[in-house]
Amino acid sequence: MPDELAELVAAAKAGDRKAFDALVQATYAHAYTVAFRLTGNEEDARDVVQDAYLRAYRGLKRFRGDSSFSTWLYRITANCASTQLGRRSRHRHEELDDDAPLADERPEIDPELRASAESDRERVSAALLALPPRLRAVVVLRDVYDLPHEAIAAELGISEAAAKVRLHRARRKLRERLFPLRAEATGEEDARAV
Amino acid sequence: MQCEEIAELLPQVVDGLETADHPLIRHVESCLRCQAELAQYRRLLRVLHQLRTEVIEPAPGLVTEILAELGEAGERGAIRSLLSGRRVAYLGGLAVAAGAAGAAGAIVLATRSRRSARLAS
Ligand SMILES: [Zn+2]
């Protein structure tokens, strides 16, 4: 599969539009998944993916192949998602308070699912969606998609130090949400603004 | 070190405990509470990593929309390259067009002069 992608990339770089279309066909579901995990909703995810492919298409000549095409595309997607989230938060006047406790507006996870080891992924996915977008972006890019800190910082337009701080906050909030009994034992930490 | 200090550091050392400070490692080795918390972080990271292979299927139509938008962008790009990259051919075309327009203008003038000549007579 990766070889196939590399061939398509080479053909697309040489100006073959059909090859780029085939690249889109081969990667769009994954790109959408990244966009959805970053933005947390379908509508934004679709916009972000469209935007990302347009930019990938225009910037294809600059793709040197030192990372995989997927990684390159994920970086562009992250950058587009960051722009989109910035737009959204300005429009909605959302608070950008990373330290606010996780809102529990989402329906409580089914207790039976909670007990099942198989549902770990579902629980973590749900917990990701409940994170503030700025924290979610960093933990998704680092811990799910394995992007290096400097790439994350570059695409989100923040310093590497800030990216790390957000990552650690995000991990902590996720742990507290996923293991609530434990969170009670250390509950006083919630109140402290880091 | 106190458990509270350790708890603060666990989210950053979970993916690189070997690089953590010795006092931290010593504490975790001897403290069940912090061990339990570290295990939770490890489990969290493991599951997060598993999400990488998961695909959330978009509602139908997305790929069509993307390709349509790329098609439009491609056409705009083609027009741009016509205007810049093939300027010589384009200017040549302009000259031909101007020539044609000139010829047409001459015909108009001719008919006009003929008409005015008729009017004059
Ligand atoms: Zn301890």
Image: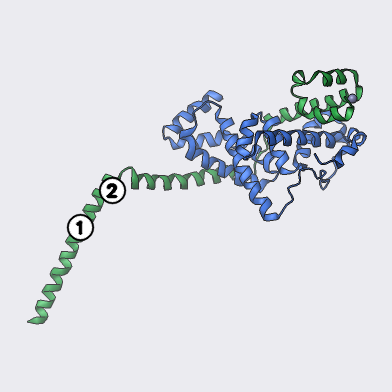
Chain colours: A blue, B green
Q: Is residue A131 visible?
A: yes
Across and down, in percent, residue A36 comes to 67, 41
At 54% from the left edge and 40% from the top edge, which residue is drawn? Answer: A53
At 80% from the left edge and 28% from the top edge, which residue is drawn? Answer: B9
Q: Is residue B23 above or below residue A128?
A: above
User: Label 2: few (<14), some or many (≥20) within 10 Å?
Assistant: some
Subunit bearing disc 1? B
At 44% from the left edge and 37% from the top edge, which residue is drawn? Answer: A17
Query: Residue B100 got which mark?
Result: 1
Q: Secondary structure at mark 1?
A: helix
Subunit bearing disc 2? B
* Figure quadrant, ligand 1: top right
**Image-quadrant location for residue B37:** top right
- Quarter that holds the N terminus of chain A: top right
Q: Please name the residue that numbered disc 2 is placed on.
A: B90
Apparent side of residue B42 relative to residue A57 in the rendered image (left or right): right
| Three-letter amino acid code of the residue under disc 1 | Ala
Apparent side of residue B31 relative to residue A63 in the rendered image (left or right): right
Q: Same chain, marks 2 and 1?
A: yes
Between the residue at mark 2 and the residue at mark 1, the CA separation in whole angstroms equals 15 Å
| Three-letter amino acid code of the residue under disc 2 | Tyr
